Amino acid sequence: KTYQLFWIFMYWILPGHYILEGLLVTQFYEDDTPIQASLGSPFWDYLGCDHQASQADNTLDCVGSAEEWVFATFGGIFVIDHIPGCIAYLVGLLIITRLVTFWALGHLNYRKA
């Protein structure tokens, strides 16, 4: 949502996206730890807390789970179903990097003897 169209390919190419998604989703999957939503935050909107705000004493009691917070904060694109794809991408990137490194060590020589 916040990226310019020109840079969106970097979001999908760089491994940081897959690492962050894997860490957050696996850490907070089925985590029912209560998290207090801040007024006006995406989490607040996701939980639909506008109707829960108490007008009488001006206290806000809007609580969701850690799993819901991850879903709301990242716009629903970080889900547990993506984990096999994240693992496959990272392992594939590792293998390609190793193969390119081994090829370069064997074929590139900057000290022409």
Image: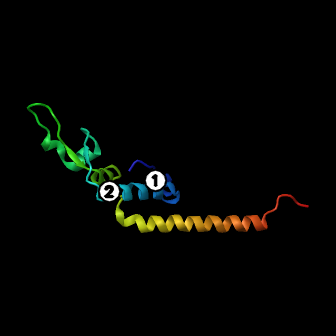
Q: Eyeballing the image, is 85 above or below 43?
A: below
Q: Residue furthest right?
A: 113
> Count the marks: how many?
2
- Sequence-wise, the earlier of marks 1 and 2 is 1
**x, y percent for residue 20:** 44, 54
Residue that label 1 marks: 5
Q: Is residue 102 left or right of residue 74?
A: right
Characterize the local packing of mark 2: few (<14), some (14-19) or many (20 or more) Cα atoms within 10 angstroms. Answer: few
**Helix or strand or loop: what does disc 2 sit on?**
loop
Q: Amino acid at mark 2?
A: Gly
Q: Amino acid at mark 1?
A: Leu
Q: Eyeballing the image, is 34 above or below 58?
A: below
| Nearer to us in this view, 14 or 32 | 32
Quadrant housing residue 31? bottom left
Quadrant housing residue 103? bottom right
Discs 1/2, front: 2
**x, y percent for residue 75:** 33, 53
Quadrant housing residue 24? bottom left
Residue at the spot 15% in from the left edge and 34% down from the top edge: 59
Q: How far is mark 1 from mark 2, CA to CA?
A: 19 Å
**Helix or strand or loop: what does disc 1 sit on?**
helix
The circle on residue 76 is 2
Characterize the local packing of mark 1: few (<14), some (14-19) or many (20 or more) Cα atoms within 10 angstroms. Answer: few
Residue at the spot 45% in from the left edge and 49% down from the top edge: 4
Looking at the image, what colour scheme do you see?
A: rainbow
Q: Is residue 110 left or right of residue 21?
A: right
Do tag 1 and tag 2 residues touch (Cβ < 8 Å)? no
Q: Eyeballing the image, is 6 above or below 36?
A: below
